[in-house]
Amino acid sequence: MTGFAGSHGDSGERRRRSDASPVITELIDEATVQGIAEEAWSALVGDEEFLVPLPGGLPDDAVSSWVEIVGPWNGAVVLTTGRSTAKELTRCLLAEHAPPVLDDEDVEDAMGELANVVGGNVKAVLPGPSVLGLPEVGTAPEPGLPADTCRVDLLWRGQSLTITVQGSAGVLDEQKNGVPL
Amino acid sequence: MRALVIDDSRAMRRIVSGILEGLGYEVQQAGHGREGLDVLDGGWLPDLVCVDWNMPVMDGLQFVSAVRSNPAWRQVTIMMVTSESEHTQIVRALAAGAHEYMIKPFTADAFRDKLALLGMLPEEVAL
């Protein structure tokens, strides 16, 4: 890139770098994300519930919930775990307020709320002003570049759960290509 | 005492309503600000409203502004209960007319402490 800039004077590279959104790894680290998650778990799931920072394989039936953040940094905070773990989480979250039988809507709602709480507190440590989207549940949005992804692999009650703070793929493509989409 | 709990999350409505019912409140729930206003318009006037910020149809800030624009609802105490935790957001909510601000996640004890600060614990519980 240096040779290119030298042969053409202003390549626009410096301008694009200064205009580009920051990548998430410049703004937040894994320990901060884990700390936010631990606080959410302790308050919402149970004060004796611990998240262990160990990687584990996600099952094939994994489900994700996420909230988008739009601002100086654009992306999403995504929680992913297996369906049975999501159901167990829902029962802990609702505790004595849980209905006798949990339906899919209960589980999706609880997973969405966990993403909302973690996402809201992640947003608070990012540069603002930013807007938090409404929770969504399903197949997680495609992440952007690895450099714009902060991923924490955790175990809860021995089951895998990942939290990723991931840049929007669209925004990164724009930065990468230097061409507005 | 009466409380209206407004949150688009069914789980959070159940949790907050459960705490309030445990304190002796009669509780109604709404899934967004517009539904909350419908409850008030219907004549069911609560002593306390716990309202989330980010919701579809009508968000919590719009709800607070709407309530504060109606003199008939002046005595309603409003607490925002939200994951929006930046200082600027807290200032906006209080400026719009919310009395207190509870950041998610919270424990039941922290929630009761906020109610105590507001003087909204039923007398028999506060003693």
Image (cartoon, rainbow, N blue to C red):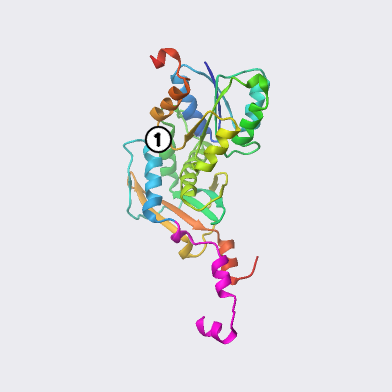
Indicate the position of residue B10 as horizontal and vertical percent values: 53, 33
Q: Please indicate, yes or no, whether residue A63 appears anywhere in the rendered image.
A: no
Q: What residue range appears in magenta?
A: A1-27
Q: Is residue B88 above or below residue A102?
A: below
Q: What element carries label 1?
A: helix
Residue shown at 43%/48% (left/top)? A82
Q: Is residue A14 covered in magenta?
A: yes
For the view shown, which residue lies furthest in the top direction? B124
Main SS, magenta region, reads helix
Which residue position holds label 1? A92
What is the quadrant of residue A89 in the picture? top left
Q: Please indicate, yes or no, whether residue B17 appears anywhere in the rendered image.
A: yes
| Front in this rendered view, residue B89 or A82 | B89
For the view shown, which residue lies furthest in the bottom direction? A7
Taking A84 as reference, is A10 left or right? right
Indicate the position of residue A108 as horizontal and vertical percent values: 51, 41
Q: Residues within 10 Å of mark 1 (few under 14, many from 20)?
A: some
Indicate the position of residue A169 as horizontal and vertical percent values: 56, 62
Indicate the position of residue B27 as horizontal and vertical percent values: 53, 21
